[in-house]
Image: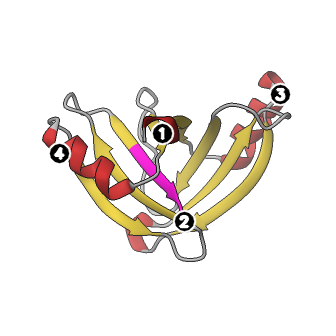
């Protein structure tokens, strides 16, 4: 099972998706792989998924929450792709982590996601391709 788990992305909250994606493209050669939007109410978001031109390695996700203030820079969300979100959430709880949002399927996406915090409070997003 360990072979199917990998570091997949880093996510940062931004105020201006277009300006930020242009910056990471011009300065660091990142390309836009796709755009995603979803959620409702305070959870509504738009997101740009970027990565290297060759498609290798982890992604950089830029997220803008439509109805929330953008938090100050400093904390990122670490993303991990896993084979079984529920198993990882259970393991996190046993190891002292906190479940911030339990596993759920994203409408229109072939993904299950959960949000966690490690024992020191760092944000983690766990995804499972279904």
Tell me the residue that label 3 is attached to: 29
Task: Indicate which label's residue lies in the foreground, 1 or 4.
Answer: 1
Q: CA–CA distance between discs 3 and 4? A: 38 Å
Q: Is 52 displayed left or right of 107 in the figure? A: right
Task: Identify the residue at horizontal 46%, vertical 45% (top origin).
Answer: 70
Q: Earlier in the sequence, mark 1 or mark 2?
A: 1
Q: Earlier in the sequence, mark 2 or mark 4?
A: 4
| Secondary element at image label 3 | loop
Boundaries of the magenta span: 125-130
Q: Nearer the viewer, residue 73 or 47?
A: 47
Q: Earlier in the sequence, mark 3 or mark 4?
A: 3
For residue 27, above or below residue 110:
above
As for residue 8 lying within the magenta part, the answer is no
Which secondary structure is most common in the magenta stretch?
Answer: strand
Tell me the residue that label 2 is attached to: 130
Q: Earlier in the sequence, mark 2 or mark 3?
A: 3
Residue 16 in the image: state x and y as whole percent. Answer: 64, 46
Q: Which quadrant is home to the N terminus?
A: top left
Task: Indicate which label's residue lies in the foreground, 3 or 4.
Answer: 4
Q: Earlier in the sequence, mark 1 or mark 4?
A: 1
Tell me the residue that label 4 is attached to: 93
Task: Indicate which label's residue lies in the foreground, 2 or 4.
Answer: 2
| Secondary element at image label 4 | helix
Residue 73 in the image: state x and y as whole percent. Answer: 46, 30
Q: CA–CA distance between discs 1 and 2? A: 14 Å
Tell me the residue that label 1 is attached to: 5
């Amino acid at each position: 099972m360990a072979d199917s788990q990998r570091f997949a992305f880093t996510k940062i909250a931004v105020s201006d998706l277009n300006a930020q994606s242009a910056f990471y493209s011009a300065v660091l050669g990142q390309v836009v792989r796709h755009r995603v939007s979803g959620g409702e109410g305070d959870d509504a978001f738009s997101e740009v998924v970027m990565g290297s031109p060759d498609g290798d390695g982890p992604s950089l996700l830029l997220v803008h929450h439509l109805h929330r203030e953008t938090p100050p820079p400093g904390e990122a969300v670490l993303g991990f792709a896993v084979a079984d979100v529920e198993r990882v959430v259970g393991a996190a709880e046993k190891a002292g982590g906190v479940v911030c949002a339990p596993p759920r399927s994203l409408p229109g996406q072939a993904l299950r996601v959960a949000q966690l915090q490690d024992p020191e409070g760092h944000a983690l997003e766990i995804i499972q391709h279904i």
